[in-house]
Image (cartoon, helix red, strand yellow):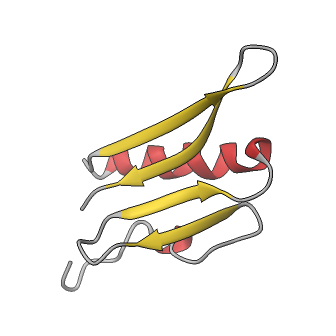
Amino acid sequence: MGDQEDPFEEFRKSSPHHTAETRPSGTLILSAKQSLLNFQPVARRALDIAAENNRRFKEHTVRGRRGEEFYDQITIFP
């Protein structure tokens, strides 16, 4: 990325709500840690930033008991 600021810096360290893995290729993988509900704001923010920065991403969702869908993993490609 050179001198540009990394738009995903805030996600690169794991938090109580997510784990973060950066692959050698630069791919960033965010996964729900304990609570899918608590991971949703993290996932939505990461997806918004990816869209703003024209980055390709892949989201993985699981279906809740009431039929709602929750993100459980987000992959953002360089």
Q: Quadrant of the N terminus?
A: bottom left
Task: Please say if 78 is above or below 53.
Answer: below
Q: In the visual, does 55 lie left or right of 66?
A: left
Give how far across and how far down residue 10 sits, in percent.
Answer: 55, 71
Residue 77: x and y in percent read: 28, 56
- The residue under the point 24% across, 62% down is 78
User: Which residue lies at the image location 57% right of the left edge and 47% below the top edge?
Assistant: 43
In this image, 67 relative to 45: left or right?
right
Q: Residue at x 37, y 41 (%)?
A: 58
| Quadrant of residue 34 within the rendered picture | bottom right
Residue 70: quadrant of the picture: top right
* Residue located farthest toward the top when viewing the structure as drawn: 67
- Point out the residue furthest to the bottom here: 3
Q: Nearer the viewer, residue 70 or 48?
A: 70
Q: Is residue 64 above or below residue 4?
A: above
| Nearest to the observer: residue 70 or residue 7 | 70
